[in-house]
Amino acid sequence: MKRARHFASDNNSGICPEAWGALEEANHGHASGYGEDQWTRKACRLIRDLFETDCDVFFIFTGSAANALGLASVCRSYHSIICHEASHVQNDECGAPEFFSGGAKVCTLTGKDGRLTPEAITAAIDKRRDLHFPKTGALSLTQSTELGTVYTPTQLKANCHAAKKSGLKIHMDGARFSNAIASLGVAPKDITWKAGVDMLSFGLTKNGTHAGEALVFFDKSLAREFDWQNKQAGQLASKMRFLTAPWIGMLQDGAWLRHANHANKMAKRLRRALSKISGIKFLHPTQANAVFVDMPPVLVDAMHKHGWHFYTLYSDNDARLMCSWDTTPKDIDDFVGDLNDLMTKRKKLRPNTRKGQGRKAN
Ligand SMILES: *Cc1c(COP(=O)(O)O)cnc(C)c1O
């Protein structure tokens, strides 16, 4: 069956009205290229206001490029980058952090529900300090995490402290930063620079824009030569206003937070509805806009055949259901209704023999 919306990824959603309107508004007459325009200046100002600090802001086409270039700006080729084993940096960027840093090694750690702990970070740093192993250069934390959880300000502070003691720089992958703010109800500064984060890849694409993430340097000294690094990587947008105008549309009247709140609320609603089906188990807490369900492959396959798109990312039976700014209560009712019907008939289903939809970047 053809459906309007799915639970595959929040980047499967379209452009929200606020971002679309801002694009339209910017689409009149001529404006200087490469960021020398009024929209880019205003977007930067709104980001500084949001974080309540003077920071350097660069707009970059994709989140992968923002992560990789941000990390490359603080890592030499002989450094290592510590991150969670589920992180986008490790799994979904085709080695871009290693490439742009000229060889820095990504070292992954385990951690419950997608979160790293200070103990794990300290152990990773202390494990090898000799010159035969890469020198730890950066810690990358994802907020909200790839597994739909969030770090509290206290947890972040402890992680940053553990890494900073040994001179590491702190990068935050904030592809779903807005969802974390909506979940925690804190000020953006509380989970970034005040907690010790040096730079943030701030994403709005999944939350309603068409493209363009902001790499925000809270430690401005780290951005000294970033202009060149960014240009060399082909990330300096020619018609920059069309990357930055949507940021104005999203930030100036709070749409970024409204949409994230909505997506989180839909995830909670989805979880509540699923929990009423007997036999459904959840794999992680639902603190942002993702619900992870333990779903046997036979059921995953049956739901896919019913026309529902969603991924099993980390094993055959961990179905990741992502809600987005445009998810509706009816989408949830339809999905849960279909799942409920299939579970009732489950005994009749034959085992899964063909390959599922497999892994796709999130
Ligand atoms: C989507 C996502 C990104 C950015 O991905 P791009 O497709 O390169 O924009 C980065 N980190 C996480 C955790 C993501 O989910």
Image (cartoon, rainbow, N blue to C red):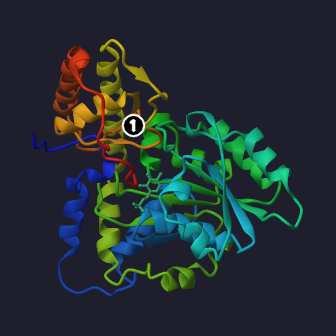
Which residue occupies the extreme left position in the image? 1
Q: Closer to the camera, 345 or 1?
A: 345
Q: Which residue is mark 1?
A: 290
Q: Is residue 65 above or below residue 237?
A: above
x, y (%) of residue 308? 21, 38
Report if residue 51 is visible in the image. no
Q: Is residue 237 above or below residue 245?
A: below
What residue is rendered at 53% in x and 63% in y?
67
Type of amino acid under label 1: Ala
x, y (%) of residue 72? 62, 71
Q: Closer to the camera, 217 or 302?
A: 302
Q: Is residue 287 above or below residue 355?
A: above
| Count of residue discs | 1
Position of residue 182 in the picture relative to residue 272 (left or right): right
Which residue occupies the extreme right position in the image? 130
What residue is rendered at 32% in x and 48% in y?
10
x, y (%) of residue 125? 80, 52
Mark 1 C-beta to ligand 1 under 8 Å: no
Disc 1 element: strand
Position of residue 107 in the picture relative to residue 143 (left or right): right
Quarter of the picture for ligand 1? Answer: bottom left
x, y (%) of residue 190? 59, 45
Q: Quadrant of residue 295?
A: top left
Which quadrant of the rendered structure holds the N terminus?
Answer: top left
Q: Quadrant of residue 70?
A: bottom right
Position of residue 47 in the picture relative to residue 156 (left or right): left
Report if residue 218 is visible in the image. yes
Q: Is residue 334 above or below residue 259?
A: above
